[in-house]
Each structure stands twice: as structure tokens, then as C-alpha cells.
Image (cartoon, helix red, strand yellow):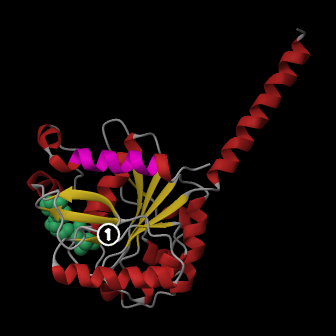
Amino acid sequence: MTVEVISEFRKELESVISRYYKLRRIRGKVLAFPSGKGGVGKTTIVINLASALALRGQRVLVLDLNFALPNVHMYLDERPLGTLTHYLNGEVEIDQIVGRVVLKDAEFFIVPTESVVDFQKKINVEEINGVIDYFRSQFDYILIDLAPGLSKYVVYPLRFSDHIFIVSADVKPAYMDAMRVLKLVSSIGGSHEGFIINMAESEELTYFKHMGVFAIVPYDEHLRKASQMGKTIFHVRLSGLLSPSRKVFTKMADEILARLKIE
Ligand SMILES: Nc1ncnc2c1ncn2[C@@H]1O[C@H](COP(=O)(O)OP(=O)(O)O)[C@@H](O)[C@H]1O
Ligand SMILES: [Mg+2]
């Protein structure tokens, strides 16, 4: 083979690779995790699932859309210059709002949010779609952390999500509210992939027994302690290995990779 042929072949190959990457880049999946009740563990689940997906080699972004009481920033190792709230107010560029979480063998990214209660400024919910679309072209999975309930700050992003997982506890009031969220998801034509039942005391469910359940996350003291330190269960070594929830997050990530593939 002559040098020209080799060089031509190499160019061809590079272009195929770059086209492949471009194609796969614009197909990032948006996963949203609403809940009826607050405090059921949405933020904890989003952050730990993001770690598990990152450890499987995925490029993952967690987008905090809880404009009332945001928590995701607690987990940042590298803070960005501004937050989503600053960006929506025109104070920083979009690339200046992405922070980083560092794991031993992986990393993932976070777009934090400033509480509008502290901020005293108005958020234009319609701009959120543009933000989601922008990041869709850079990440494999975008996990959206939401406020509880059904405000416009929840409903609007749900319309732009590819896959929805309602988070709940297996207790009656949480179940009843979760059903209302499911009704809303159906009414907007959202794709509900199953409930995530958190802080479960046993594998035997009561209220969600006959419902489509995506995962059951056990009550886990190690997970609660890790969250309190602003860490995921994948950061803490010994207790991480003893943790019953850690396996569940890894299984959830594998299930997502198998079921919700990025073509
Ligand atoms: N599976 C679990 N086991 C033990 N504690 C948990 C579990 N999931 C969440 N928690 C704890 O419950 C509290 C509320 O969780 P959080 O993720 O902030 O809920 P939400 O985002 O739905 O308001 C946190 O202190 C968190 O550490
Ligand atoms: Mg939360």
C-alpha cells in the first residue's frame, strides 16, 4: 500500500469516527425523576445513579431544576462560576455553569441552581428547554432533579424528558400523590419507565405491589451518612461496599444502559 492510500484510508476512518461521535452526541437521553411528596429521596437517587452511570463510562450531567429548594450543589467537588439561575438571568455564559464531581475512576457533571427564594428574581421556565437541548449534545445522559409536586417548574421539564421515573416511598400518602404524578405524566404523553421505591424496609411492597416498579432502594444508613457529607455511596470506601443501596444503583445503571440505549 502506498503512503497516499494509507493516508486516505486514515482520513476516511477519522471522518467515520467523528460522524459517529457527532451522531451519538446529539442523542443524549434526558431522564427526569419527579415525586409527589418531598423528602422521598429524589436528589439522593439522581446523584447516586449519576455516579453509577459515570462508573460505566457514560458522560453524565445532573441538572438541578429545583428552583425553590435546590440541593444538588452540595455534591460539587469543583464549583462552576455561576449557576443555572445566573445563566437564566443573563449574568454568565452557559459553559460557565457546569461543575464537576470526582470519583476514584470516573467523573460526572452538575449544573447547580440558586434558590429563587434567595435570588428574588424571576425564572422564565420556557428557557429551560433551550438549556436541556444545549446539554443534550454534550452528554450521554442528563438526569433532572426536580422539586416535589406538580408546579410549572416540574411539568414543563417533564415535557422535554425522554424517560420519567416517579420516585416514592411505599406509604399511603406518598402512593396517593405518586398516582397524581403518574396521571399528569400520562396526560402529557410522557414515557414512564416505572416507579423507584426508596427507603424500602423490605422487598415486599404494600402499595406499589402491583405497579410497574423500576427499582427498590432499601433504607440505608450508609447512604444517609454519605449524603450528609455531600458524597455518593461510591465515594465512601468501606461502608460503600457494605451498603445495600450501592448494588441497587449499579443495577439501575445497567438496566438503563440496556433498556434506554443511546443509539
Ligand atoms: N435509601 C435511603 N436510605 C436512607 N436515607 C435516605 C435514603 N434516600 C434518601 N435518604 C435521606 O433522606 C433525606 C431526603 O432525601 P433527598 O434526596 O434530599 O429527598 P428529596 O430530594 O426527594 O427531597 C436525606 O437526608 C437523604 O440522605
Ligand atoms: Mg431534592
Q: Residue 244: image x %, image y %?
A: 16, 47
Q: Quadrant of the N terminus?
A: top right
Identify the residue at horizontal 40%, vertical 75% (top origin): 65
Outermost residue to the front:
210
Q: Residue 76: image x %, image y %?
A: 31, 57
Residue 247 magenta-highlighted: yes
Quarter holding ligand 1: bottom left
Q: Is residue 59 visible?
A: no
Q: Residue 74: image x %, image y %?
A: 26, 63
Q: Which residues are magenta?
A: 246-257
Identify the residue at horizontal 25%, vertical 62% (top origin): 44
State whether the magenta stretch is mostly helix, strand or loop: helix
> Where 124 sits versus 243, above or below?
below
Residue closer to the observer: 3 or 46: 46
Residue of label 1: 211
Q: Amino acid at mark 1?
A: Met
